[in-house]
Image (cartoon, rainbow, N blue to C red):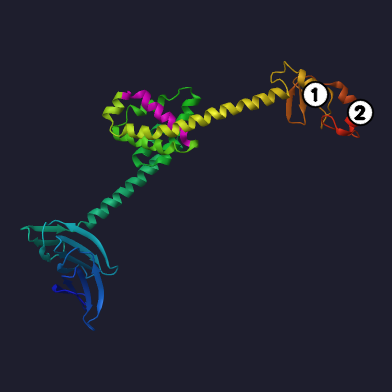
Amino acid sequence: GHKRGVWDCQFSSHDRVIATASGDRTLKLWNIGDCSCVRTFQGHMAGVLRVRFLGTGLQLVSSGSDGLIKLWTIRTNECESTMDGHDDKIWALDLSPCGTALFSGGADSKIAVWRDTTKERDNAVREAEEQNIFMEQKLSNHLRHKQYEKALEIALELDKPYQVLKVLTQIVEKDTKNSRGIETLQKHVVKWSPDRLKQMLKYCREWNTRARNSHIAMLVVKAVVTSIPAAKLASKYEGVPEILAGIAPYAERHFDRLDRMVGDSYLLDFTLFSMGSLHGSNNEGYNEWAERSKYVLPPKEAEGKIQIGGSLIVGGKKNKGHDSDSSDDDIVTIGESDSEASGDES
């Protein structure tokens, strides 16, 4: 099965299989009963010199001429870990009697001792998950009790951009109602460390790419540049100028969009003024149109203004002649009809 010489072999103490290490850079697992190859493990960059079974025989550990030690799972045929501790070929590899340590010796005149830290890492991951759940619960409690300033710090610590955006929106709305501007944001900015400031500016760079989030992003940037001098931002905060340079193009685009929207709003003002004075002081154009037109619904007077069709209020005085002359059998028109125009000509 191997294409080059076999350097080592190891019998399993839990099953009728044997593992072999070869100079063709592969490991093979053989069935002793029928001498068939059960598994082939590939991953070493040079010849494999030593192989050993681990634990209950479900894993293999191997060393090679590339100076690497690899841990393999037999069931999945995958390399679970690669350990680099030698600068030359690893000729010696063996386990401690209790199975908790691995010893390796190489041509670089080094003897390395490797210990199994799986339980410690699993415990660390479990503790991190518990801490994360605890912090998320604290964040939810602060949001529920509207303690937004404490919620902001926790959301930043958990690195949750969506929650940070949600909290900042609430802070801005609260300060707007109290006419405080961006005072709360400025208080937080002066307390942030350089890493926290860069984190927030990166969030702003992402938020600024969408129009609906650009307002919050610009307020945060304003709080930063008004609380920290520009010279200090450029010199002592590494990476901040590049982040701000990424924010600028989208900010210019949003300001251009707002300018166009303000310009377009004048068309609405002109249209409303053409229909009648907004303040009820100049009604010459409206009164002239009202004298030669009939309404779809009888006009009603509400607070000195005429209500047309039950929805639109146009400044003017009530025309009493229409109430007495119109009836349910009248044909109601708006403006001048073609038939009336032709009758006048004849």
Task: Kindly report which numbered mark, 2 or 1, lies closer to the viewer in this rendering.
Answer: 2
Q: Is residue 19 above or below residue 137?
A: below
Nearest the viewer among 190 and 77 is 77
Question: What residue sits right under mark 1 in the picture?
Answer: 289
Quadrant location, the N terminus? bottom left
Q: Which residues are magenta?
A: 213-230
Residue 170 visible, this angle? no
* The furthest residue to the bottom: 34
Q: Quadrant of residue 73?
A: bottom left
Give the quarter of the figure containing the C terminus: top right
**Residue with the mark numbered 2:** 345
Instruction: Tell me whether circle 2 and circle 1 mark residues in contact (CB < 8 Å).
Output: no
Q: Residues within 10 Å of mark 1 (few under 14, many from 20)?
A: some
Q: Is residue 317 above or below residue 224?
A: above
**How far across and how far down the image is residue 282, in percent?**
73, 16
Q: Is residue 207 left or right of residue 57?
A: right
Task: Indicate the amino acid at tag 1.
Answer: Trp
Q: Nearer the viewer, residue 311 or 140?
A: 311
- Residue 87 visible to the viewer: yes
Residue at the (76%, 31%) spot, across then down: 310
Residue 47 located within the stretch drawn in magenta:
no
Counting from the top left corner in percent of width and height, residue 189 is at 35, 28
Magenta part, dominant SS = helix
Q: Is residue 222 magenta?
A: yes
